[in-house]
Amino acid sequence: MTIITHVKSAAQIVTMKGASYAPKKGKAMSEIGLIENGSVVLIGDRIAFVGSDDDAAAFLESVEGDVRIIDASGKVVTPGLVDPHTHLVYAGSREKEFEMRLQGIKYIDILKQGGGILSSTRSTREATLEQLVEQGYARLDRFLQHGVTTVEAKSGYGLTVQDEIKQLEASRKLQEIHPIDVVSTFMGAHAIPVEYKGNPDAFVNVIIEQMIPLVAEKKLAEFCDVFCEEGVFTVEQSRKILEAGKAFGLKAKIHADEIVQTGGAELAVEVDAASAEHLLQTSDAGIQALANSHTIAVLLPATALFLMEKPARARRMIEEGVAIALSTDCNPGSSPTQSMPFVMNIACLSMLMTPAEVLTAATINAAHAIDRADQIGSIEVGKKADLVLFHAPNYQTLQYHFAVNLVDTVIKNGKIVVEGGVFIANRKKASN
Ligand code: NIG
Ligand code: FE
């Protein structure tokens, strides 16, 4: 039986309408398509109506079947949040490195000494596929509790053919069994593994000649990402890897200009990447290049905060017309969090983005960053029935009442998966 759901009397509905074909840039990032005292009707796993309560009543007269009603009075309804940059699948944790960093040791120096990403690589190599799935599942649960209904997930803690495949297989399994949709990215170019210390080009060859073809053949990823950074992968190596990925149908993404300005943003535009991520050090020219491109700037203000660095220049980017998305960057080293709402809070407080802009960045623009804007990221007829109901009388309060989880209800593919802030028993992938 098809489930019909009527979410009614919402204080505000943030629809994000009108940006499914192109991301919101500049002033358009403030246009969030607000409806006051509104309704959303879901039929099965799709949105069938959005508008006023009165028009919803008329619409429902034309629909056959029992209607489940969700009272959204006093609440803000948004599209399911989209997290377009995570390192979801890994084993181990790095709280000791956090303490070292609090004493002044730099993140990149910990990596150079064999810790950081290489420490998570050791634990991930030791873990079985089942253990990675179990730990990833628990992280996805936390994402869901924070209103996230789609995440991107990168590999990059295996760094051997076999271990990269194991990580990507864990992502695929999670996509199959967890209600959240998981979009997979191959990131074998995340660090130079110890076996190739001093000979990074040989590792680049393994990525290009062995990993990328196998990942493509097994259809384990949709995107290919590179950590383009001083002491990690150079611009030339990154270009080679991303071009090789593209030749095998993997769309490009780049960790760019995070610690040092390398020209990563310009490279992202050159290879027509779906997104350029971090961008803490991006130059004015890099911002200009992004503004004149299809590439989305995925900003990670929780990472900047956690690394105690200055955040990206979001205001300048918005003024120049760059399309911005936001993400947790969930990973064991530089951002161990699953809270997109908190990332949105930080984006306001540290980068001076407005409450409207951060909603755009966490929904429709984030959907564009993972090439899913035709399906998710806005409340429009025909899109996936992914919604979040927040305990807030208006959208500004989502940022004003900060650092608490205001999520009340999460609907994924038309199914209620979180209610009253808690999981519904036996949740699994919705099939209708
Ligand atoms: O996006 N910068 C590179 N990769 C991750 C961090 C991964 C880690 O520290 O484990 C990032 O911040
Ligand atoms: Fe990252």
Image (cartoon, helix red, strand yellow):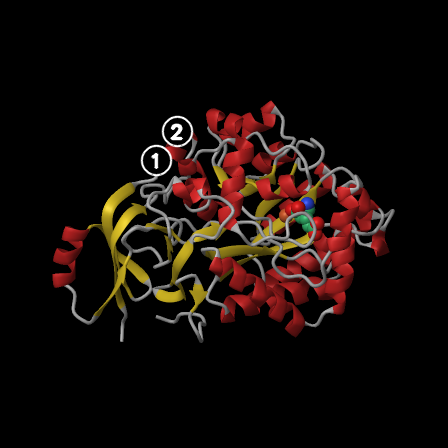
Picture coordinates of residue 59, whole percent (x, y): 15, 57
User: Which numbered circle lies on residue 227?
Assistant: none
How packed is label 1: few (under 14 Cα within 10 Å), some, or many (20 or more)?
Answer: some
Task: Report which quarter residue 27 is drawn in.
Answer: top left
Element class at badge 2: helix
Counting from the top left corner in percent of width and height, residue 134 is at 61, 71
Looking at the image, residue 11 sits to the left or right of residue 166; the answer is: left
**Quarter of the figure that contains the N terminus:** bottom left
Query: In this view of the protein, which residue sits in the foreground, 82 or 303?
Result: 303
Quadrant of the image containing the C terminus: bottom left
Residue occupying image coordinates x 72% and y 66%: 162
Q: Which quarter of the picture shows residue 140?
A: bottom right
- Is residue 189 visible from the viewing direction of this image? no
Residue underneath mark 2: 27
Q: Dot 1 corresponds to which residue?
A: 31
Q: Are marks 2 and 1 in contact (CB under 8 Å)?
A: yes
Q: Does the residue labelled 2 lie within 8 Å of ligand 2?
A: no
Asked whether 80 or 125 is in front, the reply is 80
Q: What residue type is labelled 2?
A: Lys
Mark 2, Cα crowd under 10 Å, few <14 / some 14-19 / many 20+, is few
Does mark 1 have its CB less than 8 Å from ligand 2? no
Question: What amino acid does circle 1 point to?
Answer: Glu
Query: Residue 293's x, y, as percent?
Result: 50, 33
Left or right: residue 357 compared with residue 110 = left
Q: Residue at x 40, y 42 (%)?
A: 397
